[in-house]
Image (cartoon, grey):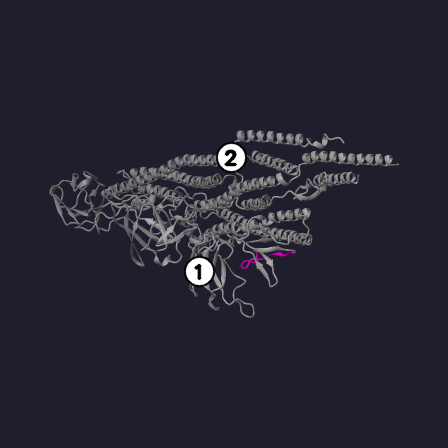
């Protein structure tokens, strides 16, 4: 009897327990990170009777959660990758808007400015044409400046996004530590603390969206969480705090660090991968810097060439003088690392400065100057865009700029490093510095006249000064006389003037006057073909007279030089050593390339984001397939155990009837 | 394989979101008409657009320069036409001045007429170009380029032309020195002139004509001196080549007969005097029209000249005027050629611009038909997704369980 009652009671309890578990599952069907729980039934220990083992009913063995650690880890890591790609895509799409194609872009502004110069060539003294050029110059400078400002805004956005993300991660980490503590306290029993474990797994999943983590299960049931190649974020019930601190070189850039007892430990951004924070850092350190350097290189190369050509021409003022600078850009920047050696007052013990020298060779890159670990006293220059390293010395000109150590301070020590930015800060401060239309130097200081008795078909195309170091009006008047006609079509020439006589060779299509050996600092281009001497030494070859321009306000020679900048491939030339120079790109090509580069990155990242998102979704589905709650399944099981409960209740009823029967028989 | 309910909803919702986003992208493309709005839509397409845009800008600038050149060349052409007109009138006047029956008074009148025409010609040479400059200013000249000085009219500037244009070279001015100061002297090959009489020291009594060329291959370009000795009937002409020293004699020499030497053929006419000398030199490109006119006026104003002198000076003046006229015609045809070239360039530039515009359109513009049909498809599939979501979420076991 009591056995029957016990059986019934036990069965009812067990069914109730299972129904409660199913109810728990149904209630938490939509809870994120919830793994469905299953109550495991086992038979109670049987009793040995003379007639065999009598079963004692059912009991609940344990309630376990359906959990697969491999699938969970897969879901975490793929979600980290997807989250990171998503964040990078959003940032790159914002970056792309700074370099639009077509009418609103920087390329169009540069084209408009140089095309307006053609109207000054048509009417050199017309103030209206000059005013249009000034207007276009201002428009172009404004577009560059606003692009630079947009990039600065993106940088500020990255910093503030990182700060917000770090706050979230810190609170998640603190919660994780709490849960770890709770799990630790309850770790002694042989049953799992299912809900706490689910909570902890979910917290790790959430942290993975911000930064990829690795986990290590400890013996006491707690889980250690590590980021960035082994730095601990959460260990047992202690959580470390992430902080956003200033980049060691640049006060506007940020980096991540872990707060420690003795100071902050910076996290190497190269070791952080996955999650939106790592993407933000990668975007800041790579894509944002590339964009700043691209537009800075364009702005600087164009401005320096325009200003040099202005100084080589004559403006419209009375009397005519050399032109002044038309545009200005932001200056070069040198940023010492905060860890560089300082004296007791806090001033740096060494200093470095850079000066832009040759606009053609400026590269779209920042540089790191550091001591050579192999040879103390030598220095290495690392070009960040491609990692190319070369050794440099004080005063050396490399990639279009000169490095100078501060002569009043000690030379940099072996542990001192500097970040050099020759062009990155140029665009944001680009502006027009000339406001008077008469200031545009349209006239060339040198003019040429073909002699009327020339027998060839040579006519003058253009002549202007090109090199401020070698051109001088003191070299005029001079005469160019063509001498020997070479079988390959080139013609030798001699140029005679106050400097003596110099000889060169005219090649069809190439200018003369600044070729090696002549080096007079001007370039003269000829249409047609001059005739050389009839016999060697006859001296009757064609001649061209070179004079100082007598009427500068009707001369448009220097404007031709401006116009030629459109087609000259001078941006980003490289000295490959041994006299080899790789060709640069024209202004429009350089802009197209930069815009296309960013566009290609966006395209690639969009593809990657779609793929990684799909992978993360698939991993989530796989995990949910095992651990997720299916309401229909729970409903079916509910029905099953409800019937079991009813049957067990019936058993109690039967037990009661049997008991009543027994009592009534005994009375 | 199981399906978790929450995961199922999540997947469906993200699908819906994705389809909605695709539809919105197509919508934006349809509204703007462009398939390349940012570089990431098509990086190579965006680069093509940039290149096409840059070319269009350059072609447009070149077209503006062409217009400026055309204006200048038209003005130059009409100025040269006017100048030729005036030279014609002067020629007629000079021919009239050769009338033997005219006296000094008539010649004074003709001189005044020529002087007036000469001043008109000077104002044509200094014609402004309507934008502050002058048509014949060359590479730059004083304002105005031709100065009427004590020594005669002089081109005060740098010869050559100002050129504009970025893809081509279009001239903006005409070389003033070339048009007005570089006619070929003499008859184009050699220059004949009269020298003082060797015996009397006064002017020659005969006169020499401008001369012709019989054989260009025999021309030497040397300087010669011709001296007539003796009187009518027993005259001898001695031709000395001053450059080489060779001497040729013609005996007997009859007045009015042509002397042929070294490819040259010239005639000395009129009453010859013993010792009359004449010079022959190589022709240069240095004949100045205004000097010719000034000299003609001065000679016509000189009273009391012999008929031979008048013949001589008239012949020379006509010869020089014809050379000047010829030169001006050459320059005029040069300018006309330039205008032709500009017309041709105009067509070429228009074609180039059209080509670049089509390039840009091909790279940038949306194929409307394709986009619209794509939009239809996306609309339909979004609709299907919404319907299936609504249908599936109604299916649940709890609906059929009634306790």
**Numbered range of the magenta stretch:** A238-252
Which secondary structure, mark 2? loop
Q: Quadrant of the N terminus of chain A?
A: top right
Task: Say whether residue A246 is magenta.
Answer: yes
Q: Nearer the viewer, residue B345 or A577?
A: A577
Q: How many marks?
A: 2
Above or below: residue A317 compared with residue B106: below
Q: Is residue A550 visible in this depiction of the protein? A: no
Assign the C terminus of chain A to one quadrant of the image. Answer: top right
Please provide percent x and percent y for residue B166. Answer: 42, 43
Q: Is residue A588 above or below residue B347?
A: below
- Please tell me in which quadrant of the rendered image residue A639 appears: top right
Instruction: Let me know if residue B80 is in the magenta part.
Output: no
Q: Secondary structure at mark 1?
A: strand
The residue lying toward the viewer, choosing from A322 and A124, is A322
Q: Which residue: 19% across, 49% down?
A: B197
Q: Position of residue A638 (x, y in %)?
A: 72, 35
The residue singled out by tag 1 in the image is A380
- Please, which chain is the residue tagged with disc 1 on? A
Which residue, given by chain and number where applicable, does mark 2 sit on?
B365
**Closer mark to the observer between disc 1 and disc 2:** 1
Q: Position of residue A364 (x, y in %)?
A: 47, 52
Tell me if mark 1 has few (under 14), some (14-19) or many (20+) residues whose alpha carbon lies within 10 angstroms of its own: some
């Amino acid at each position: 009897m009591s056995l029957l009652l016990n059986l019934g009671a036990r069965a009812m309890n067990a069914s109730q327990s299972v129904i409660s578990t199913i109810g728990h599952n149904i209630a938490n069907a939509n809870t994120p990170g919830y793994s469905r729980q299953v109550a495991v039934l086992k038979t109670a220990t049987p009793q040995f009777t003379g007639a065999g083992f009598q079963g004692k009913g059912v009991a609940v063995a344990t309630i376990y959660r359906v959990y697969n650690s491999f699938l969970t880890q897969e879901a975490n890591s793929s979600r980290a990758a997807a989250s990171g790609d998503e964040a990078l895509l959003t940032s790159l799409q914002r970056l792309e808007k700074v370099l639009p194609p077509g009418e609103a872009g920087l390329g169009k502004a540069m084209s408009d400015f140089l095309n307006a110069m053609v109207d000054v060539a048509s009417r050199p003294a017309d103030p209206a044409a000059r005013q249009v050029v000034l207007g276009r110059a201002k428009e172009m400078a404004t577009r560059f400046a606003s692009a630079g400002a947009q990039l600065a805004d993106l940088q500020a956005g990255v910093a503030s996004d990182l700060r917000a993300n770090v706050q979230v991660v810190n609170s998640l980490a603190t919660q994780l530590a709490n849960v770890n503590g709770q799990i630790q306290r309850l770790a002694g029993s042989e049953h799992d603390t299912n809900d706490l474990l689910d909570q902890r797994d979910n917290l790790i999943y959430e942290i993975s969206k911000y930064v990829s983590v690795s986990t290590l299960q400890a013996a006491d049931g707690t889980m250690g969480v590590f980021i960035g190649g082994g730095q601990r974020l959460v260990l047992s019930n202690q959580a470390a705090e992430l902080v956003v601190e200033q980049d060691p070189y640049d006060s506007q850039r940020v980096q991540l660090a872990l707060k420690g007892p003795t100071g902050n430990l910076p996290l190497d951004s190269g070791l952080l991968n996955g999650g939106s924070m790592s993407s933000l850092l990668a975007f800041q350190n790579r894509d944002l810097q590339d964009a700043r350097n691209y537009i800075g290189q364009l702005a600087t190369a164009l401005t320096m060439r325009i200003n040099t050509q202005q100084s080589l021409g004559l403006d419209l003022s009375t009397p005519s003088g050399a032109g002044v600078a038309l545009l200005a850009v932001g200056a070069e920047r040198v940023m010492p690392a905060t860890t560089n050696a300082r004296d007791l007052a806090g001033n740096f013990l060494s200093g470095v400065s850079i000066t832009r020298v040759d606009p053609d060779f400026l590269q779209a890159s920042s540089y790191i100057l550091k001591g050579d670990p192999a040879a103390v006293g030598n220095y290495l220059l690392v070009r960040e865009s491609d990692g190319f390293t070369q050794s440099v010395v004080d005063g050396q000109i490399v990639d279009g700029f000169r490095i100078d150590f501060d002569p009043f301070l000690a030379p940099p020590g072996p542990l001192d490093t500097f970040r050099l930015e020759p062009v990155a800060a140029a665009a944001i401060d680009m502006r027009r510095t000339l406001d008077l239309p008469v200031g545009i130097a349209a006239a060339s200081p040198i003019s040429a006249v073909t002699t009327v008795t020339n027998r060839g078909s040579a006519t003058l195309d253009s002549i202007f000064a090109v090199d401020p170091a070698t051109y001088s009006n003191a070299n005029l008047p001079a005469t160019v006389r063509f001498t020997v006609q070479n079988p390959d079509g080139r013609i030798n020439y001699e140029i005679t003037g106050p400097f003596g006589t110099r000889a060169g060779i005219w090649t069809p299509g190439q200018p003369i006057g600044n070729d090696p050996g002549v080096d007079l600092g001007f370039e003269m281009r000829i249409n047609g073909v001059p005739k050389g001497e009839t016999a060697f030494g006859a001296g009757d070859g064609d001649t061209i007279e070179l004079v100082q321009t007598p009427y500068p306000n009707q001369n448009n020679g220097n404007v031709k030089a401006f116009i030629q900048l459109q087609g000259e491939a001078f941006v980003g030339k490289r000295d490959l050593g041994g006299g080899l120079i790789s060709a640069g790109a024209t202004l429009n090509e350089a802009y197209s390339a930069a815009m296309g580069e960013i566009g290609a990155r966006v395209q690639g990242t969009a593809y990657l984001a779609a793929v990684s998102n799909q992978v993360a979704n698939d991993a989530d589905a796989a995990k949910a397939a095992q651990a997720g709650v299916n309401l229909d399944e729970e409903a079916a099981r509910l029905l099953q155990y409800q019937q079991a409960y009813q049957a067990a209740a019936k058993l109690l009823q039967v037990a009661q009837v049997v008991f009543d029967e027994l009592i009534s028989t005994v009375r | 394989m199981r399906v978790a309910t929450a995961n199922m909803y999540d997947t469906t919702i993200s699908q819906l979101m994705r389809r909605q986003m695709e539809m919105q992208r197509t919508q934006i493309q349809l509204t703007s008409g462009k398939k390349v709005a940012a570089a990431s839509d098509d990086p190579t397409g965006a680069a093509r657009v940039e290149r096409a845009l840059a070319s269009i800008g350059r072609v447009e600038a070149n077209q503006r320069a062409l217009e400026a050149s055309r204006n200048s060349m038209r003005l130059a052409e009409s100025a040269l036409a006017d100048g030729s007109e005036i030279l014609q009138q002067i020629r007629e006047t000079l021919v009239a001045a050769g009338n033997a029956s005219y006296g000094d008074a008539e010649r004074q009148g003709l001189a005044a007429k020529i002087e007036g025409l000469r001043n008109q010609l000077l104002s044509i040479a200094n014609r402004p170009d309507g934008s502050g400059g002058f048509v014949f200013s060359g590479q730059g000249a004083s304002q105005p380029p031709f100065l009427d000085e004590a020594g005669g009219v002089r081109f005060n500037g740098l010869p050559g032309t100002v050129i504009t244009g970025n893809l081509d070279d279009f001239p903006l001015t005409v070389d003033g020195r070339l048009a007005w100061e570089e006619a070929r002297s003499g008859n184009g090959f050699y220059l004949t002139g009269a020298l003082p009489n060797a015996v009397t020291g006064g002017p020659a009594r005969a006169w020499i004509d401008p001369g012709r060329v019989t054989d260009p291959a025999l021309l030497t370009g040397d300087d010669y001196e011709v001296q007539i000795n003796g009187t009518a009937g027993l005259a001898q002409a001695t031709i000395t080549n001053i450059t080489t020293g060779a001497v040729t004699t013609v005996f007997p020499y009859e007045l009015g007969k042509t002397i042929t030497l070294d490819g040259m053929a010239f005639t000395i006419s009129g009453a010859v005097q013993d010792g009359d000398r004449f010079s022959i030199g190589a022709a240069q490109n240095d004949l100045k029209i205004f000097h010719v006119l000034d000299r003609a006026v001065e000679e016509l104003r000189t009273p009391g000249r012999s008929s031979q002198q008048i013949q001589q000076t008239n012949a020379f003046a006509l010869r020089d005027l014809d050379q000047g006229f010829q030169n001006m015609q050459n320059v005029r045809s040069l300018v006309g050629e330039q205008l032709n070239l500009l017309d041709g360039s105009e067509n070429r530039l228009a074609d180039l611009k059209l080509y670049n515009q089509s390039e840009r359109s091909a790279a940038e513009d949306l194929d409307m038909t394709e986009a619209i049909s794509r939009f239809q498809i996306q609309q339909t599939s979004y609709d299907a997704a919404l319907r299936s979501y609504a249908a599936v979420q109604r299916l649940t076991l709890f609906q059929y369980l009634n306790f």
